[in-house]
Image (tube, helix red, strand yellow):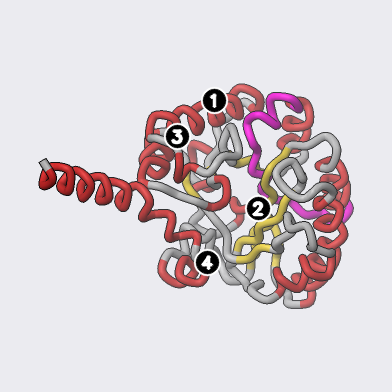
Amino acid sequence: MKRLATAAAVLAAGALAVHAAPALTTIAPARRRFLPGLSGAGTGDHIALTFDDGPDPRSTPAFLDLLEQRKIKATFFFLGYMLREAKGLGREIAEAGHEIGLHGYHHRCLLFRPPAATYDDLARGRDLLGEVLGRPPVWFRPPYGVLTTATLRAAHRLDLQPVLWTSWGRDWAVKATPTSVFDTLNGTLAGGGTVLLHDSDCTSAPGSWRRTLAALPRLFDEVDRRGLRLGPLAEHKGSPSSRSRRS
């Protein structure tokens, strides 16, 4: 009986390891080096600008105004439950020429969700985005950047391309400031990279979006100073967004 229990424990541990192994991609330096596609790496003269957690009527319009002033397009990763309450804003973002990706229906760590629940969350979010925006999303970014085997399988079944980032501003943190957000980003900013920021504080420190917004002009100026282009993931060469069915 003890042997059977030991064998069962070994099998369970093995199954958990298989499920959780992709979560190692959250280690950014290793991901950038060994999995550049998953990190959102693209052509060397372009940086992809991405925002998570919207659309949020309290904050996203301010980001849209600044982007319009600077003539910059970005990729917004929507949460399904946020879009459900702000469908008009979601359409406005898309109609302004920004790219839309899926961040999940709920903002929950997929490491602790079984395969069926993982698939249901992605499918529910994808279907809502398709219904509201008239086309399904191309990109999927998992909450907290945590991937699992079940997540990868669900994304494949739903024709979603997982993508993470090469640079972030840690703008969700309680102690973040516009300067810390910019400095953190700038430390890993490089052509071909993907920047992660947030246009909502729905899963972050209250008011954190204001610090993100205040950091953006410095980011835009720095990209200009380096002679690089800033835009959505669709402008990365070889992007799945450029495939004919989504053009």
Residue 139 is situated, as x and y percent measured from the top left of the image, at 54, 44
Label 3: which residue? 118
Label 4 vs label 3: CA separation? 23 Å
Q: Is residue 30 above or below residue 207?
A: below
Residue 69 is situated, as x and y percent measured from the top left of the image, at 89, 53
In the depicted view, which residue is nearer to us: 148 or 133? 148
Label 2: which residue? 232
* Disc 3 residue type (three-letter): Thr
Q: Which residues are magenta?
A: 69-86
Choose the circle earlier in sequence order: 3 or 1: 3
Choose the circle earlier in sequence order: 4 or 2: 4
How many residues crowd mark 4 within 10 Å: few (<14), some (14–19), many (20+)?
some
Residue 18 is situated, as x and y percent measured from the top left of the image, at 30, 50
Label 4: which residue? 28
Q: Nearer the viewer, mark 2 or mark 3?
A: 3
Residue 98 occupies quadrant: top right
* Disc 2 residue type (three-letter): Pro
Label 1: which residue? 127
Asked which secondary structure carries label 3, the reply is helix
Q: Nearer the viewer, mark 1 or mark 4?
A: 4
Residue 128 occupies quadrant: top right
